[in-house]
Image (tube, helix red, strand yellow):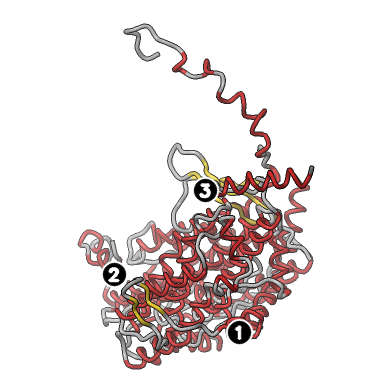
């Protein structure tokens, strides 16, 4: 069943409900979910042809494909919910950086392999628990989340294994992955942010409790980092703002490249 | 005595080839057969890997999500095909590492087509149509190669390659029936990629030093010119169907043979590009060398970890 | 300079109750990564029921020259085949 069909199916539609005043926030949440996947998938795809091993070119491309597919489905649902006639491609290719709702974590350039793995690992843990919840509760992302749980389990297996191999490999690999973790740490808190209506959406049963999600994340991440011999920085500061459109400078450059062709030929079919 | 038994072995070997049998890695084979296969299979593998670069160039700029995913999946497949082919080559006792070193040192060849730049999105469509189209013609033939692992790798590749060509042609057809700018874009791409695609089939067989022995021993089953003609025959009607012109004023249909006869290839360009002076040769090799060099610490880490954990068990 | 990865042979089980069939090989630093690589390289378009990876140097194989003495007993002892025996009429399920 397509997402469109699911959304219109009376049995499924009755499955979840959203008070009118919260609808814009819900749309925002779905866009956020899609943007995380799109931006991260795009960054990962930059590795294709440049990976440290051929097998890794294939593995990273696999994760990128899953993420971009997920983004396409989610942005499609967002467009339908919004009801302004925007398709997934419209949302992906014709919005400015300030209208994107991804966390800053996913927009940084790919860096070295350790940076890519650490960033992906942090995201995978978040995505696994988030999708697990979404797949078990009524809501517009339920179908997509069901598929995402299976995909993310596999992604997380891959990135966890690499965190261990890099952390407990050579001195150089350890230094690189520790460096990456130190740099990325302050961007991890933002993964769990919702907009101003986040609490209301949670109370309406449409979003998981963010504190629970964060606590699960802390446990899982802590276990792997301990096994890999990696420490985390002593800081309480967490970057915020990207989920309301205040991104880093990197997103603008990324979107310039991603959107150039579509924007150069408005209205054209590809 | 030795010479006699080698002649006998060779006779037995050639009889097997004539019976259509598959030669497996541990079977007796002439040295030249083994060497030619290592050369051919590794070149084929290198081509798949280097081929990821011109197309990979457009993944971040694909104009919609569906095209983005299809292109990423295609390039991923190419990495996979390279792996199948390195695997097949390794059955003959050469390590992948050694083959990759040869590529990076510039002593191994790969298909000349990948030394051309992808200048527009239309190039991506035309590559799928022409380059994958030509590769399919070649690989369909190689799926019947006398060397078992090579034949099997090509069977696997053929199954996956069909979507590559379809995707390419769909892009071409969409552009050809699109805006004026899109039409111009795809016609320009066709003008640039047609002749290099014909060169993919290699020199005329008379000018190809290894053709005879490769045919005799069933490594390949058809001549370069036969395959090239077949490719032209299937492609001309496709171009006509989408109203695109092929840049060859000598293209003419021959009623008797049923072939589309075509003009002479610029062999100077072919040898120049193969010899290292094509538009992108240096860039392609540098990209591969860099990826390999930058990845050394990763591979070292994986090995170190494996050693530590093996000894703990 | 060393690539220093091991070679693993990959076997896939495609059908319920079916045998594992050889699909090719992958390079990997260890068995866990070999399993993941095998899935990414050989099972992109379908889900096999099961994947086995075995280090290539752990496989012992026959060689073509074994054809005579190694395999001979295989087909010249007819008493291993059920058709060698007769069953009295009327007796079923033997």
Observer-nearest of C63 and A39: C63
Q: B37 above or below B246?
A: above
Observer-nearest of A119 and B22: B22
Q: Name the residue under label 2.
A: A18
Observer-nearest of B210 and B247: B210
- Can residue A233 be seen in this snapshot? no
Q: A266 above or below A1?
A: below
Tag in front: 1 or 2:
1
**Mark 3, chain letter?**
B
Point out the image quarter for the N terminus of chain B: top right
Q: B232 above or below B28?
A: below
Q: Are marks 2 and 3 in contact (CB under 8 Å)?
A: no
Q: Do labels 2 and 3 share a chain?
A: no
Q: Residue at x 35, y 61 (%)?
A: A143
Q: Name the residue under label 3.
A: B20
How far apart are the two marked residues, 2 and 3, measured between alpha carbons?
Answer: 69 Å
Circle 1 SS class: loop
Q: Residue at x 44, y 54 (%)?
A: C46
Q: How crowded is mark 1: few (under 14 residues within 10 Å), some or many (20 or more)?
A: some
- Can residue B150 be seen in this snapshot? yes
Tag in front: 2 or 3:
3
Q: Name the residue under label 1.
A: B280
Point out the image quarter for the C terminus of chain B: top right
Q: Which of marks 1 and 3 is nearer the N terminus?
A: 3
**Mark 2, chain letter?**
A
How far apart are the two marked residues, 1 and 3, measured between alpha carbons?
Answer: 41 Å
Tag in front: 1 or 3:
3
């Amino acid at each position: 069943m397509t997402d469109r069909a699911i959304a219109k199916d009376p049995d499924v539609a009755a499955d979840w409900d959203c008070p009118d005043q919260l609808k814009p926030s819900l749309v925002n949440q779905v866009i956020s979910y899609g943007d995380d996947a799109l931006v991260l998938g795009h960054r990962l795809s930059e590795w294709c042809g440049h990976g440290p091993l051929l097998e890794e070119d294939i593995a990273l491309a696999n994760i990128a494909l899953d993420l971009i597919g997920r983004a396409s489905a989610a942005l499609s649902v967002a467009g339908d919910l919004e009801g302004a006639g925007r398709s997934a491609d419209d949302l992906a290719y014709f919005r400015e950086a300030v209208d994107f709702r991804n966390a800053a974590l996913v927009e940084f350039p790919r860096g070295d392999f350790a940076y890519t793995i650490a960033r992906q690992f942090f995201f995978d843990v978040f995505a696994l628990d988030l999708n697990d919840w979404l797949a078990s509760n009524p809501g517009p992302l339920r179908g997509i989340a069901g598929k995402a749980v299976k995909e993310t389990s596999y992604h997380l297996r891959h990135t966890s294994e690499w965190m261990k191999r890099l952390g407990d490999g050579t001195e150089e690999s350890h230094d690189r992955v520790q460096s990456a973790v130190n740099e990325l740490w302050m961007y991890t808190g933002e993964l769990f942010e919702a907009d101003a209506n986040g609490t209301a959406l949670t109370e309406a049963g449409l979003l998981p409790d963010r504190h629970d999600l964060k606590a699960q994340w802390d446990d899982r991440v802590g276990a792997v980092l301990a096994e890999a011999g990696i420490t985390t920085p002593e800081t309480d500061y967490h970057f915020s703002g990207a989920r309301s459109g205040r991104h880093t400078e990197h997103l603008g450059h990324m979107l310039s490249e991603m959107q150039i062709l579509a924007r150069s030929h408005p209205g054209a079919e590809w | 005595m030795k010479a006699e038994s080698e002649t006998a072995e060779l006779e037995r070997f050639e009889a097997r080839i004539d019976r259509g049998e598959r030669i497996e890695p541990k079977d007796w084979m002439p040295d030249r057969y083994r060497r030619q296969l290592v050369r051919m299979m590794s070149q084929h593998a290198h081509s798949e890997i280097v081929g990821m670069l011109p197309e990979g160039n457009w993944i971040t700029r694909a104009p919609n999500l569906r095209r983005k995913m299809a292109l990423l999946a295609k390039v991923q497949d190419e990495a996979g095909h390279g792996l199948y082919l390195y695997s097949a080559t390794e059955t003959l006792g050469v390590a992948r590492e050694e083959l990759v070193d040869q590529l990076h040192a510039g002593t191994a060849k790969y298909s000349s087509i990948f030394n051309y730049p992808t200048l527009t999105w239309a190039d991506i469509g035309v590559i799928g149509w022409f380059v994958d189209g030509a590769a399919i013609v070649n690989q369909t033939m190689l799926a019947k190669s006398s060397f078992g692992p090579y034949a099997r790798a090509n069977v696997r590749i053929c199954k996956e390659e069909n979507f590559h060509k379809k995707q390419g042609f769909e892009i071409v057809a969409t552009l050809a029936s699109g805006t004026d700018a899109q039409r111009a874009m795809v016609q320009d791409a066709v003008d640039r990629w047609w002749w290099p695609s014909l060169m993919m089939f290699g020199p005329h067989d008379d000018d190809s030093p290894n053709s005879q022995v490769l045919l005799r021993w069933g490594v390949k089953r058809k001549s370069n010119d036969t395959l090239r003609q077949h490719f032209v025959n299937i492609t001309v009607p496709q171009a006509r169907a989408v109203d695109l012109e092929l840049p060859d004023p000598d293209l003419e249909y021959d009623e008797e043979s049923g072939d589309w006869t075509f003009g002479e290839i610029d062999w100077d360009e072919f040898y120049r590009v193969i010899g290292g002076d094509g538009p992108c040769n240096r860039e392609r090799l540098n990209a591969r060398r860099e990826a390999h060099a930058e990845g050394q610490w990763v591979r070292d880490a994986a090995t170190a970890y494996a050693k530590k954990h093996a000894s703990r068990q | 300079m060393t690539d220093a990865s091991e070679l693993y042979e990959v076997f896939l089980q495609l059908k319920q109750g079916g045998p594992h069939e050889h699909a090719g090989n992958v390079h990997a630093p260890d068995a866990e990564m070999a399993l993941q690589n095998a899935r990414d390289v050989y099972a992109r378009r379908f889900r096999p029921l099961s994947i086995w990876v075995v280090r290539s140097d752990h496989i012992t194989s026959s060689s073509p020259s074994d054809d005579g003495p190694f395999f001979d007993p295989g087909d010249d002892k007819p008493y291993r085949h059920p058709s060698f025996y007769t069953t009295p009429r009327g007796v079923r399920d033997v």
